[in-house]
Image (spheres, coloured by chain):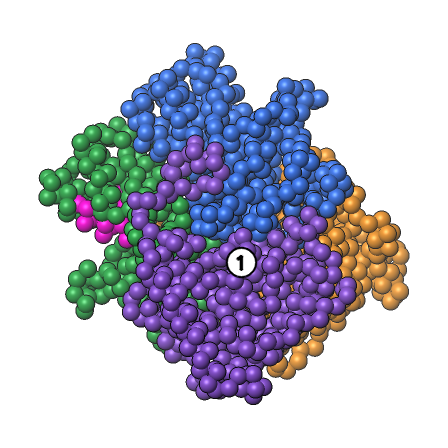
Chain colours: A blue, B green, C orange, D purple
Amino acid sequence: MSSPEATTYLAALRQAMAEVLAADERVFLLGEDVEDPFGGAFKATKGLSTAFPGRVRNAPISEDAIAGAAVGAALDGGRPIIEFQFADFAICGFNQLANHAATTFWRTGKPCPLVARLPCGGTPGGGPFHCQMPEGWLTAHPGLVVVAPGTVQDAYELLRAAVACDDPVIYLEHKHLYYHLRDPGFSAGGPLLPLHRAAVRRSGRDCTVVTYSAMVQGALAAAEGLALEGIDTEVIDLRCLKPLDTETILESLARTGRLVVASEGWPYGSVASEVITQVCAEGFHLLDAPPRRVAARNTPIPFHPALWSAHRPDANAIQEAVRGLVNF
Amino acid sequence: MSSPEATTYLAALRQAMAEVLAADERVFLLGEDVEDPFGGAFKATKGLSTAFPGRVRNAPISEDAIAGAAVGAALDGGRPIIEFQFADFAICGFNQLANHAATTFWRTGKPCPLVARLPCGGTPGGGPFHCQMPEGWLTAHPGLVVVAPGTVQDAYELLRAAVACDDPVIYLEHKHLYYHLRDPGFSAGGPLLPLHRAAVRRSGRDCTVVTYSAMVQGALAAAEGLALEGIDTEVIDLRCLKPLDTETILESLARTGRLVVASEGWPYGSVASEVITQVCAEGFHLLDAPPRRVAARNTPIPFHPALWSAHRPDANAIQEAVRGLVNF
Amino acid sequence: MDQPIEPAPCDAVAHLQWMLRARLLEERLSSLYRQGRIPGSVFTGRGQEALSAAIGMQLRPGDIFAPLIRDMAGRLAFGLPAIEAARTYLGRITGHMRGRDGNVHHGLVDQGMLPMISHLGAMAAPCVGILLKRKITGALVAGDQCVAVVCIGEGGMQTGAMHEAINLAAVERLPLVVVAANNGYAYSTPSHQNFVCRDLVDRALGYGLRGWSCDATDCRAAWQTVAQALAAARSGDGPQLISARLLRLAGHGEHDDAAYIDPALKAAAVDCLDQGRQLVLDQGLLDQAELAALHTTIKTEIDAAVDQALGEADPVASDESWQIFADPILAAGAGAQA
Amino acid sequence: MDQPIEPAPCDAVAHLQWMLRARLLEERLSSLYRQGRIPGSVFTGRGQEALSAAIGMQLRPGDIFAPLIRDMAGRLAFGLPAIEAARTYLGRITGHMRGRDGNVHHGLVDQGMLPMISHLGAMAAPCVGILLKRKITGALVAGDQCVAVVCIGEGGMQTGAMHEAINLAAVERLPLVVVAANNGYAYSTPSHQNFVCRDLVDRALGYGLRGWSCDATDCRAAWQTVAQALAAARSGDGPQLISARLLRLAGHGEHDDAAYIDPALKAAAVDCLDQGRQLVLDQGLLDQAELAALHTTIKTEIDAAVDQALGEADPVASDESWQIFADPILAAGAGAQA
Ligand SMILES: Cc1ncc(C[n+]2csc(CCOP(=O)(O)OP(=O)(O)O)c2C)c(N)n1
Ligand SMILES: Cc1ncc(C[n+]2csc(CCOP(=O)(O)OP(=O)(O)O)c2C)c(N)n1
Ligand SMILES: [Mg+2]
Ligand SMILES: [Mg+2]
């Protein structure tokens, strides 16, 4: 989080959209309030309907139809991007995503390439219905790829790669990062990166923290603090939540022997549970201590900022978990 | 699975409904095709609209409205039971369940007691949209209780307890068990059992198999087979998938040191992942071998019976997993 | 239909008072928002008070009210103390939502005012469920039924949830009144991008129910339409659909400058509050001085309520149980981790 | 609307042939079902063939067809080889669904026939999406557009999904034709428990689109109505809604004895196939002997197709890759366990 001139997470993802719209006429964008002059509830699409007339379109308040329309467009050779106004409302389009988009290739052999953008995650005062992390339910059915950029560069890379992907991709963009995360070193235009590879954001030898989305920053902050105590933390940014890059995690565990999985989502049956389960299956012998989960509390997300801060995990919670393992 | 005169799973759950309808005028039933003479796609409600005129009602094909109506009725002091025709279609009512029913008590302090019955699970020839296990996504949000009876007696007990519960309860009834599972010892009318307690269905000292719903029978069959090989398997029937009765599981692991979690659901972020994660958090030291998950394959559920059988885990898969751990 | 019920006549002064209470309360909340004293945002019903107040005023104990984001006037008239609205916006522990939910997401379940969730369209089916439960238990009195009113915008009318709920009410012939406020925009989206029928009242025919249409910037029209629809529903005429034309005289929320609104629409906009003031003057119910005095009285009352809420306590995280279950056995037996 | 397009005249013999093909194919499949040779169930369009065939016959290459459970006639007429239907019911590896999906859940994506998922209402929005994508990419030819036809029952019309999709099509003024077949029952539920408007065509007004209503047990009426709606859609008149009255002359599926159907309705039922036969006789297009010969020819052709499918191979589980991803990088990089 650096100089104000640096590229924001929001600008990076907008730039990715502008590039794919320019490069590929199969791409179009559908969502509520996405057209100029408004340009989306978070301004993610600002300027795009002007630059690409007719290809960035406002939709009625009809999430199921928006998602279903994307399925059709994809089957007809399009590369639709849909924007849900908040990840919380994507639930109204869940059936089309989970039962239609996700099943089509397996059932018919015809790919269904669409990208669904979901502004997710907490902001103070957002409350129970504007702060949710939806990956818990969006990973339940087979067939959806779920990505969650945690850096400015990845906001750009993962969106480009998502549009290039032949499968339906859920792209979770974190609202808190939109303007808060900036990268002076951002660079556009390189080769497409693979969609499903995790990244080691910080190397360390005492404990591995696996995380994603806005919690990547929290984990890095936690690691800095722990370093002062002499604890050397490795931070892995999953980038892609499904399918999981278990290989990268296991490589790390081979070095550290300790695992904390941190997520802003609810605990039950979460991405964190899945990481732990896959690690147990394939790398149990690497574990020198019980794998730990750091997650949100098991209630709706509170409106009041004081409750909200206590509901979601933070750098302190990660530190505590790491300390617990290192002293195990 | 015994004499044809014995009570079926379906009869047991129908009896539970008849009893709660008779005992409690706050109870009513809403769903597609539930009225006589038809009595529901699986005949679960057969006779009830005749016995309780006006209190068992056909609904239009509107899952969201059915679920939402239950929320309202519950808030107004009712005890609605809703039937989705197949668990697969409950996804169209997911928003009302996850964001409305599940959040209301925490937000407002007013309970929202409803029971949603979901005929789930696989039958040969059912295909991708009539065989699903929905617990993967129904456990993602806080606030729903999810139960899944695996015995005839539990089909009765858990439904009564669900109606008595002050929270919204998802009741997963397995279609394959409806007529196939019979219990000559079934008895009605006892005291209400707690909703959230797991049951040890078979004691053993070599390995614990945790499972639920139709897989309970599979696990018991697997255990019988393993016994012939000298492997003594403990089988735990979760009964309640959320919240989990981790205590009972840990007690068992203290004896066996080995854990297999078997489920007909998809693997990612599943109930099985959650059991393993909670066991790792609280009972890692009890584990003498890596905890193993046995789950369905990561594709939609195939139509053809030969593929279907290979898609879902069975007693053999459980046996293999147990053997793997015992020989670890 | 049983005996027709006479629609209630409008007390223009009382109507104006509720409109004014809402306006002044929301103006105060907006000003607190601009001072950075309110988490999240503030959503006002500016320009929609005549319709909303007409609903809240004409509902009775036992009725159900599912207000939405623009319904401060209706909420107050239905019985919500102004201080409760302030507490919810501020997230005070003293409020009925205890800081757990905020801004427009609150209700008084025991009094029949449902606490909206954000998902548009989601409040209609619960209203239907309440009426259905009452029908089943014999609690709907023939000829003079309780009613449920659910409010929605023209954008929200396009959700599948509204469709299913209205249709279920029609099939069960329940006394549901759907009030669709067409304020020209859904957030930034002009209404012609949400629907293309002539008037949303045209949906009534397709559900087999009665439709009403009005210009809801006109206080009398708003009152009268609500009165007639409520009377019809109470009489046993089944669900009613009101399509009300008006304009949102504010941003979607106070964070929004509404730059996208057609300037011609803005220029031609009628503020129902001005119209309501003129009405009581024209009818000789109040004179200018009395109007000014009314304004002062209400402002004082509102400010007192907000000031009191401002002085009250925030929730404290360490006091939270994080207990999700209502059921005593589950609450005792199952940890907060579930 | 641009230049009106002349509705296509009906070739009564061809129409009858497609009806007959569907009827005989489904009868054969039902008989296999009763022999226990088909997994799951069999769902027939008995009594609905006139409507369905009229759709399939009048669609052209480039059009989109989203048939539903009762649309065997339309599928065949659109271009589905009878053997493919049999393969799908039998779950043969040779079929285009490769045993992965079955019975009515199949399509030919490349030819524009969408493989339905079970969730009622879910096929409409994809049709809208295809048309929208074509509109955006300039592939809708003014005055003679390709169309998409989506079929649905009167029960399925009550899903939120249908509402949202129809409305989106209306807002975007796309050439979508919604064919709502009101066959009196949704599974066991009589239509008055699904909707209470006079006729589902009354929904058209509320979406701002054109509606058509017909008695679809009358072959000419079914053909003519489909022809007119398609012509209007092709001309640029926006979405069209057809409400077609008929009766399901079978169980919901072959496992269902339909004992719940009103005997009076059953007694009064008209079989469109009988009506179609009478029509060609009355018009002197075929005589009794020619009709009988036609029946025999088609039966032979259908039996041959089904027999061939019966002799083909089942999928073998050990040959399955269980690969869920289409993307080559993901398919290579990510295990089947995901
Ligand atoms: C299902 C759903 N989708 C999207 C949103 C986000 N959203 C909140 S208000 C709003 C616009 C509502 O417009 P309208 O219904 O016309 O009501 P108005 O704000 O004009 O009163 C939108 C899109 C939501 N709350 N719920
Ligand atoms: C969303 C959804 N809910 C429930 C079902 C189960 N179901 C399958 S067919 C059917 C009845 C359909 O009736 P209708 O739409 O009138 O079509 P018909 O069978 O009469 O042709 C039902 C309830 C489903 N497939 N999808
Ligand atoms: Mg609006
Ligand atoms: Mg029907």
Is residue B183 or residue D80 the one in the foreground?
D80
Point out residue C269 in the picture as x, y percentages from the top left corner.
84, 55
Magenta segment, prevailing SS (helix, strand or loop): helix
Mark 1, secondary structure of its residue: loop
Report whether B258 appears left or right of A281.
left
Amino acid type at circle 1 is: Met
Provide the chain ID for the residue under circle 1.
D
- Look at the image and tell me whether residue C273 can be seen: yes
Q: Residue at x 25, y 37 (%)?
A: B259
Up the image or down, C168 lies above or below B241; here it is: below
Res C16 visible: no
Q: Is residue C130 left or right of residue A2?
A: left
Q: Quadrant of the C terminus of chain A?
A: top left
Res. D255 image quadrant:
bottom left
Q: Write the residue at 33% across / 68% down.
A: D33
Q: Is residue C70 above or below residue C202?
A: above
Give the magenta range. B210-223
Q: Position of residue D145 (x, y in %)?
A: 69, 59
In this rendering, is residue D272 above or below B166? below
The residue under the point 44% across, 18% down is A233
Image position of C253 with respect to A315: above or below: below
Looking at this view, is A306 or A315 the one in front? A315
Task: Tell me residue C66's x, y (percent).
Answer: 61, 59
Q: Is residue B146 left or right of residue C108?
A: left
Residue identifier under label 1: D113
